Amino acid sequence: MELEPRTFEDVPGEVGLVEWKDFVSHKPLRFESGEQLPGFTLRYETYGKLNADKSNAILICHALSGDHHAAGVHRLRDRKTGWWNNIIGPGKPIDTTRFFVICSNCIGGCQGSSGPSSINPETGNPYNLDFPIVTIADMVNAQHRLMTDGFGIERLFAVIGGSMGGMQALQWAISYPDALDRLLPLATTARQGAQTIAFNAVGRVSIIQDPDWNDGNYDHDHGPDVGLSVARMMAHITYLSDKGMDEKFGRERVHSTDARGRFGAEFQVESYLRYQGQSFINRFDANTYLYLTKALDQFDLYGSSGKLEDALAVVKARTLVIGFTSDWLFPPEQNRAIVHALLRCGKQASYAELDMSLGHDSFLVHTPELYELVHRFLN
Amino acid sequence: MTRTGIKRETDLQLISDWIEPGNRVLDIGCGRGILLEHLHQTKATYGIGVDTDLSKIQSCIKRGVNAYQGEAESLLAQFPDRFFDWVVLSRTAQELGNPVEVITEALRVGKHLAIGFANYGYWKNRAALLKTGNVSTSNVFPDSWKSGTPYHPISVNSFEAFCQKAGFTIERAIYLGGDWKSPCQTFPNLRAGYALYALAQ
């Protein structure tokens, strides 16, 4: 029997005021590189209530520049909600009246979790480049510690993530196949192609060529701001699309007040990117940007055999991969390839593709079709 | 049950009877996943559905049926030879952009192909064409040319001639009357409303 399809045109409810928390593990964390931290901190937020048998937890993995603040607001006067507020909340596709939703920051991050800007207890100074090289699997291992030691959750109802969060979600299903029932990676890839690595490389060069980077040992009040903002401006272009940018900005002009006159921001798109670059330096650490883009570039589920099946053979979770037609950063073919390999392994896997004009960032915007897919997959 | 429902039910039942428990099944043009859900429940099959329509994929996901949104050709190319026990093309072939390529690929990745289509040679279709000059529509195929959906009329004779020429073995052939329900084994090209085959390479 076919029920009336539910639509999410109306926003049913809000998570409202939320607070972040810190999980501190005093047990050592060994990284894939062999390096080790004596302990670590992960910052996270939760929405909804964990049920008695701890079977309703959903982990949300964030993207490169995202953080643990996925839904709600920290203060009532906040104009901006968490980055995925449109999909997480009471009655929303990731329904907090039913699920206990956890969004954790990643190890190597700069939003309160242990990362290059954290203090090294051995020296009393920030780790900077002494922080261990971080991989996607390291992020997942740290999150797994939060689930088991922090919450006592042995099995997650689902792991969901877009972009770098999608890589983490895939890695969850590989590293801990018995720890999740459902897997929902969006706008992601099992490995990046040369073009995406190339963009990340330019971003990194932009940072490390900034004289203020100082081999990573910059004063955290005065870092490589130019390098970081240029890296962000360029990366931001890769999150959009030609059509999406045309729809949003066209050739719209702004009145430049820039003293440098004609080479100031003339077009709306220039002004927008400058704003994105500037606001990024206020909330993001340049070394973390280097570490996390490196983690993205090194992620390769094809491994030495070149066969995705070798990595995915252990997956037990029912999987839905969602690609976006206009995403040229992690294009649909790379999302499809994940499902092809899962199906060749005889796994429970589905692929859906949404045709939106907004490029890679499509997964973040208000999209009834996406809400419908997520809702159906989780129910 | 509506007339359309009966038509769909018969088709589904016949194909289900051919499929063995635990088989791997690929349903091309899987729609809302009814066949695969039924096969999974009754025969514990491993099923994959492929369809181009997002709303159909959403329904499959709700049913817990594996579904792949995309073109059949691109998915078929992803599988090794004889990966599936059965590939199903139920009321799909007439709408495919390249039916011969899909049938050929289906017989590479599948040990058997179940293919069913409305027989355009059926006398009522001929009569309707003669009378109105139009390809007839029905509640199973409601789209006229205006919808833009490609429609290649297939007849029993032309299909069987194609199979012979291509070297495909017709393992089974079932012809149904105009009600798509009662058997109709004589003069099928003229008398059968629906034809269903099991093919092998």
Image (cartoon, coloured by chain):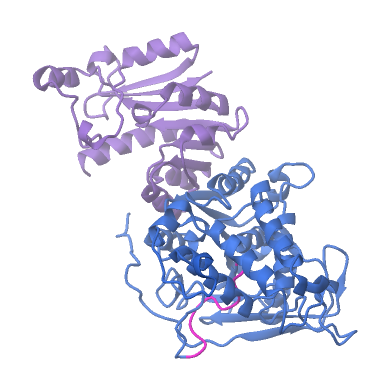
User: What is the x, y in percent for residue A361?
Assistant: 51, 61
Left or right, A345 with respect to B118, comes to right
User: What is the x, y in percent for residue A274?
Assistant: 54, 70
Is residue A72 depicted above or below A57 in this figure?
Answer: below
Q: Nearer the viewer, residue A234 or B101?
A: A234
Left or right, A79 with respect to A210, comes to left
- Report which colour depicts chain A: blue
Quarter holding the N terminus of chain B is: top left
Query: Which residue appears at 26% of the width and 41% of the height?
Result: B5
User: Most prominent secondary structure in the magenta stretch?
Assistant: loop
The magenta span reads A63-75
User: What is the x, y in percent for residue A275?
Assistant: 52, 73
Left or right, B148 with respect to A185, comes to left
Would you identify the image quadrant in which residue A277 lies? bottom right
Query: From this viewpoint, which residue is outermost toward the right?
Result: A122
- Chain drawn purple, letter? B
Taking the magenta stretch, the answer to whether it contains residue A354 is: no
Query: Which residue appears at 37% of the width and 62% of the height?
Result: A368
Would you identify the image quadrant in which residue A214 lies? bottom right
